Each structure stands twice: as C-alpha cells, then as structure tokens.
Amino acid sequence: MQFEISSIATVFNDRKAITDDFWGDVISEIKLTDNIPAEAFDGIEEFSHAEIIYVFDKAVNGKVVVGSEHPRENKAWPKVGIFAQRKKNRPNFLGATICKIVKRDGRSLFVQMLDAIDGTPVVDIKPVMKEFLPALPVTQPGWSNELMKDYWK
C-alpha cells in the first residue's frame, strides 16, 4: 500500500549537521505550517512530554536499509536488523522521539531533547501519556547502552 504524508510543522534549532551525540541541551522550536491552525496546540502545555514524529529528510533518496547492519557502522557492535536499531536509513525515513515540553507560544512548541536537525519536517505530534509507556521494565542489549552513553549529554 502506498500513501502520502504531509509535513505539519518544521523544526528550528542550532543543530545544522547530522550528528549522533550530545542532544541533551538542544532546545527546538516546532513551528506549525500555515495550513495547521494554532489551536492544534491547545492543551499541549498541560503535558510534560510530547512524542515528535519526523522525516529524516536529508536521508530520503539515499541508501535504504531493510536487512541488518552494524549500528553506526561500528564493527564492535553486532549486526542487527533495521527494526532493532534507530538508524535514519529506514524504509520510510521516519524518526520518533519523546521530548520534554518547554513551552508553547502560539503556533510554536518549544521542546528539549529532540534529536532532529534544523529544518526537519514534522509529520505528527502526540502528547505522552504514561498509560502508553511500557508497563513492564524495558530491556535492551549491552551494545545499545554503549551507543547511547553520550547521546543525551
């Protein structure tokens, strides 16, 4: 099945280059496109976090990974399937991150810890509700702990 998705907002921040680490202090403005009314954000400031779904637009038309690769091309880590890692070269080039809401200002939502570079198109925004978070402890392999050690610093 094919479908079309349109951008509903754009990310604005100081991160211009694609990099893997040190996203913790990044504050991003997510500004709605002209066809989405400001009221789409009404009530969002009552939540502490939002999940941002965005397009890895700089990777679109690049290599698509559908099999397995080493995360970050690091041969010290095992080859794992694309759905066992968060690489940008995914079949539909979509990313998703849960971010801290800093404030809402009219047509803009300011968030912290969004790992999307300046100019990234946003395709959806959802409030984080604890009932949608895992009810059981989250587990992950050791290599992913090493991969993420500097990600949010």
Image: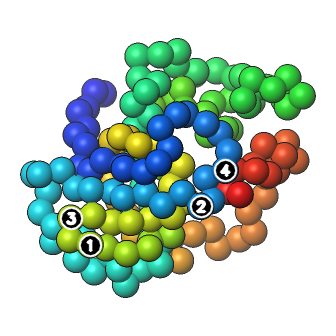
In this figure, which residue is indicated by the disc labeled 4? 22
The amino acid type of the residue labelled 2 equals Asp
Residue 126, position as x, y percentages in the image: 37, 64
Question: Marks 1 and 3: CB-CB under 8 Å?
Answer: yes
The quarter holding residue 147 reads top right
In this figure, which residue is indicated by the disc labeled 1? 105
Q: Nearer the viewer, residue 145 or 102?
A: 102
Alpha carbon distance from label 1 to label 3: 6 Å
Residue 48, position as x, y percentages in the image: 47, 78
Question: Marks 2 and 4: CB-CB under 8 Å?
Answer: yes
Helix, strand, or loop for circle 2?
loop
Between disc 1 and disc 2, whose residue precedes?
A: 2
Residue 78, position as x, y percentages in the image: 84, 29
Q: Nearer the viewer, residue 32 or 64?
A: 32
x 40%, y 70%: residue = 127
Alpha carbon distance from label 2 to label 4: 8 Å
Say whether residue 35 is left or right of residue 94: left
Q: Nearer the viewer, residue 142 or 73?
A: 73
The amino acid type of the residue labelled 3 equals Arg
Say whether residue 91 is left or right of residue 7: right
10 Å neighbourhood of mark 1: few (<14), some, or many (≥20)?
Answer: few
In this figure, which residue is indicated by the disc labeled 3? 107
The quarter holding residue 39 reads bottom left
Say whether residue 87 is left or right of residue 105: right
Note whether residue 116 is visible: no
The amino acid type of the residue labelled 1 equals Asp
The amino acid type of the residue labelled 4 equals Phe
Alpha carbon distance from label 1 to label 2: 20 Å
